[in-house]
Image (cartoon, rainbow, N blue to C red):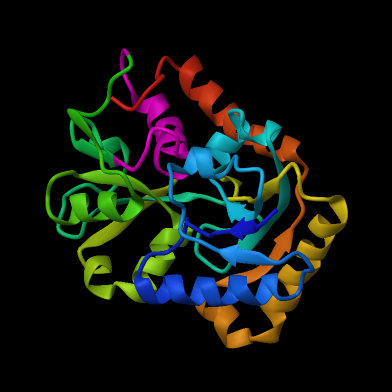
Amino acid sequence: MTWIAALPMYNVTPALDAAWREWLGDVLRRVKPACRIVEPDEELHGFWRRPNLLISQTCGYPFVHGLHEQVQLIATPHFDAPGCEGAHYSSVLVTRAEAQFDTLAACQGARAAYNQDDSNSGMNVFRHAVAPLSRAGSFFSSVLRTGSHLGSLRAVADGRADVAAIDCVTYAFMCDELPELAGQVRPIGMTAPSPGLPLIASSTVPPATIQALREALGEALTSQPERAKRLRLQGFSVLPPSDYERIEQLESEARAAGYARLA
């Protein structure tokens, strides 16, 4: 079997993508199975389920909604970004720099943007934050699905939307890599925290290789401190899969408040 690997989640710019690929290559050189770094050639839900997947990163929402039954959790990164605490993260609620909104409550009747229906950071925690403010299952005048966090940031910046929830790690990388875009938006709050994006492997990967990957993550982190600083990586935790039930809890709380979807 030819093993494959990819980190598709935090590639805010081509230069940052190259840094992630360099770090991943360093990790893979420290484990025994030969492995190719690839660009996912299919929709990510299918890619994450491939039997020859040695390491990748997924969002916690699809992980708890079925993916956890077909993969193994390797580790969850710790990021040096406002809104992160250990292996947990929040989303930044953002509006345009010149907008009059100062709180999420002030955004009633405004236009929202979000990345994907199956995103914890862009949809699920956003829905949870809005739920207590909603009335009869509604809060915004319109909702725009953009396809990515960068798409949501650009929608807010160029006036197609008024507010969005952005993974705080993505937001930090935007500030690092895209200062012009960062200057067009501003934060107005944070969402509730939940476990961060897990590194996963196929269920076919042997336990000894999972352990080797965990050791390699730490070794690759400390071998080049400047690279780790650019990637905002501080360490890793091996969380029990049950910790990710927090994501379902946030979903259930929003539904219990009568707010089943962003609206």
Residue plotted at (62% across, 34% down): 67
Name the residue located 19 percent from the left edge and 44 percent from the top edge.
162
**Residue drawn at 65 percent across, 71 percent down:** 234
Give the extent of the magenta segment: 114-136
Q: Residue at x 83, y 50 (%)?
A: 206
198 left or right of 186 in image: right
Left or right: residue 127 compared with residue 157: right
Residue nearer the viewer, 153 or 35: 35
Residue 116 in percent (x, y) is at 37, 38
Specify the principal SS of the magenta part: helix
Q: Is residue 250 left or right of residue 261?
A: right
Residue at the extreme left of the image, as rendered:
159
Does the magenta segment cover residue 197? no
Task: Find residue 232 and report its horizontal and vertical position in percent.
Answer: 54, 72
- Classify 125 as above or below 200: above
**Quarter the C terminus occupies:** top left
Q: Closer to the camera, 91 or 227?
A: 227
The image shows residue 1 at horizontal and vertical percentages of 70, 53
Residue 121 placement (x, y as % from top left): 46, 44
In the rendered image, which quarter is residue 137 located in? Answer: top left
Q: Is residue 143 left or right of residue 242?
A: left
